[in-house]
Amino acid sequence: MGRKVNVIGVGMVKFQKPGASDGYEVMASGAIKEAMKDAGVDFKELEQAYAGYVFGDSTCGQRAVYAVGQTGIPVINVNNNCSTGSSALYLARQAIEGGLAECVLAVGFEQMQKGALASSWADRTNPLDKHVNVMNEQQGVNQAPFAAQMFGGAGREYRWKYDTKRETFAKIANKARQHAAKNPYALFREVLSVEQILASDEVFDPLTRFQCCPPTCGAAAAILCSDEFAKKKGLTNPVWIAAQTMTTDFPSSFEGQSMIKMIGYDMAKQAADKLYEKAGLGPKDVQVVELHDCFTTNELLTYEAIGLCPEGEAEKFIWDGDNTFGGKYVVNPSGGLLSKGHPLGATGLAQCTELVWHLRGTAGERQVPNAKVALQHNLGLGGACVMTMYRRN
Amino acid sequence: MSELRFDGKVVVITGAGAGLGRSHALFFGKRGAKVVVNDLGGTAHGQGQSSAAADKVVAEIKEAGGTAVANYDSVENGDKIVKTAIDAFGRIDVLVNNAGILRDVSFQKMTKDDWDLIMRVHVNGAFACSHAAWPYMRDQGYGRIIFTTSAAGIYGNFGQANYSAAKLGLVGFSNTLAIEGEKKNVRSNAIAPIAASRLTETVMPKDMLENLKPEYVTPLVGWLAHEECTENGGLFEVGAGFFGKLRWERTEGKTFKLGREITPEALRNAWEQVTDFGKATHPANITEALGPVMSNLSSKSKGGNEFIDVDAALGAELAEVRSRYDERDLALYALGVGAGKNPTDPNDLHVVFERNGDGFYALPTYGVVPALNALFKSMAEGKTAPGLNYGLDRVLHGEQYTELVRPLPPSAELVHKGRITDIFDKGKNAIVVMHIDSYDAQSGELLVKNDISILARGTGGWGGDRGPSADINVPPSRPPDAVVTEKTSESQALLYRLSGDWNPLHVDPEFASMFGFQKPILHGLCTFGFVGRAVVNAFSKGDPRLFKSIKVRFADSVFPGETLKIEMWKENDLRIIVRATVVEREKVCISNAAVELYAEIPKPKSKEAAKSAPAAVAAPKLDAATTFDAIGAYLGQHPELVKSVGNVYQFRLKNPDSAWVLDLKNGGGAVKAGTVDKADCTLDLSDADWLDMVSGKADPMKLFQSGKLKISGNVMASQKLDFLKKMDRSAVAAPATATPAPAAAATVTSAITFQAIGAYLSKNPDLVKGVGNVYQFRLKNPDSAWVLDLKNGGGSVKSGTIEKADCTLDLSDADWLDMVSGKADPMKLFQGGKLKISGNVMASQKLDFLKKIDRKEFEAALGAAPAASASAPFAAPAAGAKAPIIIAALKDRLTKNPALAKEVGAVIAFKVKDGPAFTADLASATPVIKDGADAKANTTITLSDDALAEFAKTGAAQTLYQHGDVRIDGSVKPVHRLGFFKQLV
């Protein structure tokens, strides 16, 4: 067993639509400064930095960190699609846990362009080729954005199996907006009714426009440290990482003849199972969850994958209100990717930030009462799934 | 591969006790040769001697099973070394002249001993050994000599003057032996090794020396020494795994014509040409080296002197000049040549009144004026023809020929192209003839031809061609058919010069007196104009448009105010001989003159014909101001640029120079001419490169990297100018890129496109490695199949099918043509269902290289593509057309078998996109199909007509839902039970 890892500082900037944001280095340095202030740590005390982003030339991480300080520390750029931010966090956690450093920074940022995600390197093997082949076999392709076809297709497969109503998915988006309305960091805070959500432009049934997270720009950061360091800083009861796991695709993603498997259901399931085993706590012990709701269909599937409800019962879970205040869990109190926005590199660390605030009881209006154990799920196609459990005594 | 062996061969290696020599010796010993290991056993500086070194190597060879003897003689006694070989083995096949020593010292401190010793060991030693071996090699018809030279000799090296001289001496030595031995199969080569040895260990760092093993040099010696190798007279650099051959390179140089003095000044002026390696040659032997010299031996200068260099000037093209004239210029000219003295004369009004009721015509003799003005303009800009080095003070107009291809339009923009066609040496004077063609700049049509003969006073006498001297256009002895006497005005020259001939001789009394005239004289061309007018009035009914040409000789000068008598003899209807005389002085001023007329007024060329005119003439101009205007307009439409860019850019364009500020930081942004104090980023580049950049022809990054674009301030801020690429190119580039449309629309077939891909593949064989897939294309309508193999061997393109393709693409022929010509995006075709891909879908992404194929190859062929797609015989059926058939079939099936409904037990509404809506009430025992979508249905399926048709064929309900444009509202379950749709149609 390694050392205990504490999250002593978090910070983020308010996410913005593409074109309206500051440059990535400005956003990232803003988040880093917030996290440093939060932790009471000086830049000189940071021994390493893990910088996550997907879009940009090499070494943007350095450029972002340099905007805060240039102490010559190692800066490692991390790129893992939508789970980039939590991958940076994963590396930072390893450094502390393994005794390789006392205090490190994980930062994630993204300056995205308008429109759906697209490949930039047509002259080489597309990393998602196996995934796309599955989709092509299962359902062909149409004009909708590829990610929407993938996650929407998984939703169709689920509906086919469990006869789920379209409204059920819309309810997830509706819940996201209700949560976001109380989160000043969220980009889309206007509450939308289920009807409004269903009436928005159809993207790929059952997905409508308001059930898809839009490209977003933003940054978030977290500072991790050892117990010794925390003690030295006089931090008596910091949030700590009870467990963290990361999985990549299993053969079932490609051989399962299933859209649900292809988009990473088994990655999430395995990551969750291992996580609970490591932490010695199960989903029942969790009060607050930030999970990867890139599309409403994925949130629904993730409920089941990470064991918030049994398989096939997500619809009931949703209609019973077990995913919001007053229910079993509060899922995505921040508004999630759907409402807060999804800057690929920043998302994992923004989730972390949100959960740390809840565990500290400083989440303001949207505070989940009595939050002691928090769960994070961050998924990237390609693929990688990172899950983290946070605790505070 | 067979091993290169030296069995039975005798190899002598000098200096073989250590380093390179030792490595060579061990090599030859191992490869079966009998080796003579020579080493004096001295130090690297040539001191002392001992037999130990050679003996040790001999022992090593023997230990390895080889044969070797030692020799301890100095190479200066080469005969003794060779004798050792003969005595021991009876022959000598290979001599490696390897022994060497160093006496490094700066030249300043070098003693004669230092020099002599090096020469003795390297040059004399190599001589002694080679000379002793030579007869044996010649006699046996086989021999290989390898000289060891050095980079120090080839390039020079500080402190090694003696060594450098000796080493390069060996190269020359080897080169000649190569020639002399060639016929007897005795070959000689020189190698310049870099290796760790006693000679280098003091000058190179240790870790470097470790990688400079002698063993890396020996393979070259082994190969050059082998019978199989026919290399002869070569020079090689070798070391650390590198092997390269050297050769001489020579500039194209400058060749002066013989027969005239060649001065150092001339050489200085030509120095760039003498030293420019742009067009270098590589002479391999003396014969080739002498080529330029030999060919120039037969050259002969056309002569010249300080004023005229006939070699340079004759045939030289003059700088192209543009000019324009309009009605005002024509009228002013007409007044300048005496028209309008009688303002009511209709013939005069024709040429001075632009709104004259009977028409306004250019005086034909005006045809010389724009051409001559063009010459003056060039002179004023300092652009003179090469080889003509006299000033205006020597110039007189000697003869003039002007021909109008058709009447001059009342106004035109002209392009003048000229060259020097003749230069004659008239003894004291010279005559230089320039031919200038003037084209209509818009149509490219040739309008006027001029031959301008300049008499350059005092510039002749080089003994050159005197030119034709026969008298032409001599008036007949009979009285003239027409005579016009006309007095010039005192101010005639002052008026005429306003048409452009600003030679001060015609206005400046002082200049005229320097020229030897008591006062300024009238322009010859003014008199020329008087003559032309007279002929028009007398012989072409006053219509200048019938005038074809005029040829005159300027025999004497005329003073303003003098009276001209113009006599005209009609030789035939279309040719008039003319003479003009100054009445007051009875001097012939225009002689040997003739005017030709047209029988009919020539018409302008048809537009078709005009198109074939030189393209350069018609190219309109794009200027920087236009581009910045366009950027300003773009900025107006995209105010968000200010936020996203946030920089002020200063552009400084050169040639022509201009400065522009692009402010994408303050307020709403601005584009303006001029400079700004604080720019975030300043870009310096030529006007031409800027135009290329904004029109997309040049990539800013490439311009920057090649130094054509200089950026100061925040360099990376320039990246944000990328938005320039997004601007509508037509806004900035339309004029510049107005290339003619393809002449004829060729019929394009997919076969042509695949041929083009094949051609591209043969030029880019690396595609096979980069792509690594086999593609099967199945085109429809017309149907064809193609295999693009980018996986096996060198790749291939062929028609037909293949069993195992990585990726199969099905699409229409028309879509394929659109795709390869860049009109259609493959991804869009794919997502739009027009392109079906099976197998590895993403492998199709690697077809991206198709974009890189020169579009011209396709486009030339693809002119007809739109027509092809338009004429596709199958028109897509109207949307929603299949639904009614399916509804009818569904009714029919349910009527025949009402029990089917029982299995479903739900009301299902269908909404066909762009088609009818209907509801299948399958909840009751008697199923009903109703028009319209029932709002109370358990399930509503929204789908496309095609999807419905597909479903009515397959009945595969889940496939229906997973595929494409389908939406299910309400419960999904009933859809599971719609399998009876199978084979509905």
Image: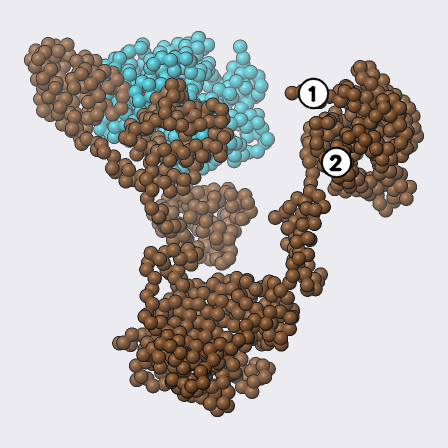
Chain colours: A cyan, B brown
Q: What residue type is labelled 1?
A: Glu
The answer to whether residue A317 is visible is: no
Place of residue B726 in the rendered image (x, y in percent of width and height, measured from the top left) = 39, 43
Which chain letter goes with mark 1?
B
Q: Residue A234 carries which label?
A: none
Q: What residue type is labelled 2?
A: Lys
Q: What is the quadrant of residue B455 in the picture?
A: bottom right
Query: Is A201 positioned to the left or the right of A239 in the image?
Result: left
Q: Quadrant of residue B874?
A: top left
Query: At which x and y percent is residue A268?
Result: 39, 15
Please state if B72 lies on the left or on the right of B155 as rendered. right
Q: How crowded is mark 1: few (under 14 residues within 10 Å), some or many (20 or more)?
A: few
User: Do badges 1 and 2 share one subunit?
Assistant: yes
Residue at image position (49%, 24%) is B793
What residue is at 33 percent from the left and 46 percent from the top? B744
In the picture, measured across the screen, residue B796 lies left or right of residue B516, that is left
Which quarter of the rendered picture does the C terminus of chain B lie within? top left
Q: Position of residue B430 (x, y in %)?
A: 59, 73
According to the image, label 2 marks what residue? B183
Count of numbered circles in the view: 2
Q: Horizontally, is B690 left or right of B393 in the view?
A: left
* Residue found at x 64% / y 54%: B273
Front-most of residues A313 and A186: A313
Q: Looking at the image, is B594 positioned above or below residue B438?
A: below
Q: In this view, does A321 lie above or below B916?
A: above
Instruction: Indicate the secondary structure of the residue bearing disc 2.
Output: helix
Q: Which chain carries label 2?
A: B
In the image shown, does B321 or A4 lie closer to the viewer? B321
Q: Mark 1 points at which residue?
A: B3
Residue B325 figure quarter: bottom left
